[in-house]
Image: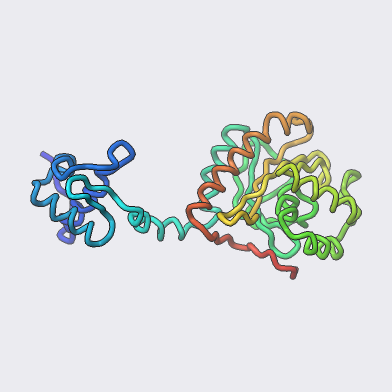
């Protein structure tokens, strides 16, 4: 015997109304009254009341015989989706990416002249760079910072480079504004950035920009690897396609959810 665990608060008619909405799907975009009643295990009279109520509310359209959902039903889930923060949206995709490439991946946003790590999915490998959520690095030194900077207007890039601390951290660090400006132009053209041991010896990273539904760069996602395991060529060949596919999925979600909220995001010019 099945035990009904629903409490005394449970509104059965509301459950039935939601069942009527769920009866429509990609395979059944239009249904007759009888089909809705059968799919929801309702009497024809009950199904008719639910459908006509939904029609009065603007969620269903009927030509007198067939019933269809209207785009207004998207409102029922929009408030939930719009409440997602960028890290919440991105994290499942980063987890899948890390499982595919077996390298660490992070989501970063711009805060002043730094990038801040707001989501990180590590691997079991020990990296020489100790990075956790909240870690900050100068944006111009990192692949993820460069894809975000490349999305800014040229005038703002010039302003940021003019005040950047360009002292080298390794023998490979770009240390002139002209070199960085040229690199950012390259990043903008190709759609990704690859930084080879400029932040730390032995550390390579590749990053791609995350864009909102208006096409604005709001964050970046990277994959970080040890130079001893991955050459520049293998990063481009083996890791970059997975990274770009992941970012495309995040972008697609952002086109649905609209404006994003991410702790630390700030494209202003203060530091």
Quadrant assignment, res 266: bottom right
For the rendered model, the colour scheme is: rainbow
Q: Residue at x 74, y 70 (%)?
A: 270
Quadrant assignment, res 261: bottom right
Looking at the image, is 99 positioned above or below residue 59? Answer: above
Q: Give how far across and how far down residue 65 sits, in percent.
A: 17, 46
Left/right placement of residue 232 relative to residue 222 reads: right
Q: Residue furthest bottom?
A: 270
57 or 221, which is in the foreground? 57
154 or 269, which is in the foreground? 154
Q: Quadrant of the C terminus?
A: bottom right
Q: Give how far across and how far down residue 61 sits, in percent.
A: 26, 53
Left/right placement of residue 248 relative to residue 31 reads: right
Q: Residue at x 80, y 49 (%)?
A: 185
Q: How many marks?
A: 0
Q: Residue furthest front?
A: 63
177 or 222, which is in the foreground? 177
Left/right placement of residue 131 relative to residue 196 reads: left
Looking at the image, is 127 positioned above or below residue 62? Answer: above
Q: Residue at x 87, y 64 (%)?
A: 162
Q: Give how far across and how far down residue 87 sits, in percent.
A: 55, 53
Q: Quadrant of the N terminus?
A: top left
Q: Give how far across and how far down residue 246 sits, in percent.
A: 58, 40
Q: Residue at x 55, y 47 (%)?
A: 250
84 or 171, which is in the foreground? 84
């Amino acid at each position: 015997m099945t035990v009904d665990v629903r409490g005394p608060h449970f509104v059965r008619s509301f459950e039935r109304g939601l069942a009527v909405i769920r009866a429509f799907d990609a395979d059944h975009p239009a249904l007759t009254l009888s089909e809705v009643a059968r799919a929801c295990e309702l009497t024809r009279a009950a199904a008719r009341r639910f459908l006509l109520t939904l029609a009065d509310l603007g969620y269903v359209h009927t030509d007198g015989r067939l019933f269809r959902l209207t785009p207004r039903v998207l409102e029922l889930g929009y408030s939930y989706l719009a409440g997602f923060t960028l890290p919440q949206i991105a994290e499942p995709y980063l987890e899948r990416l890390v499982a595919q490439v077996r390298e660490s991946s992070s989501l970063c946003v711009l805060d002043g002249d730094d990038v801040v790590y707001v989501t990180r999915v590590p691997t079991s490998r020990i990296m020489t760079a100790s990075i956790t959520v909240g870690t900050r690095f100068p944006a111009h030194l990192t692949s993820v910072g460069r894809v975000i900077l490349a999305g800014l207007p040229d005038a703002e890039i010039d302003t940021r480079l003019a005040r950047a601390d360009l002292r080298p951290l390794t023998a490979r660090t770009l240390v002139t504004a002209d070199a960085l400006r040229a690199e950012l132009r390259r990043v903008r053209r190709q759609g990704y950035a690859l930084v080879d041991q400029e932040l730390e010896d032995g550390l390579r990273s590749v990053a791609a920009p995350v864009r909102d539904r208006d096409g604005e760069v709001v964050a970046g996602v990277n994959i970080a690897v040890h130079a001893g395991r991955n050459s520049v060529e293998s990063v481009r060949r083996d890791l970059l396609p997975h990274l770009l596919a992941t970012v495309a999925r995040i972008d697609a979600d952002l086109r649905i959810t609209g404006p994003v909220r991410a702790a630390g995001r700030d494209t202003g010019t203060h530091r």
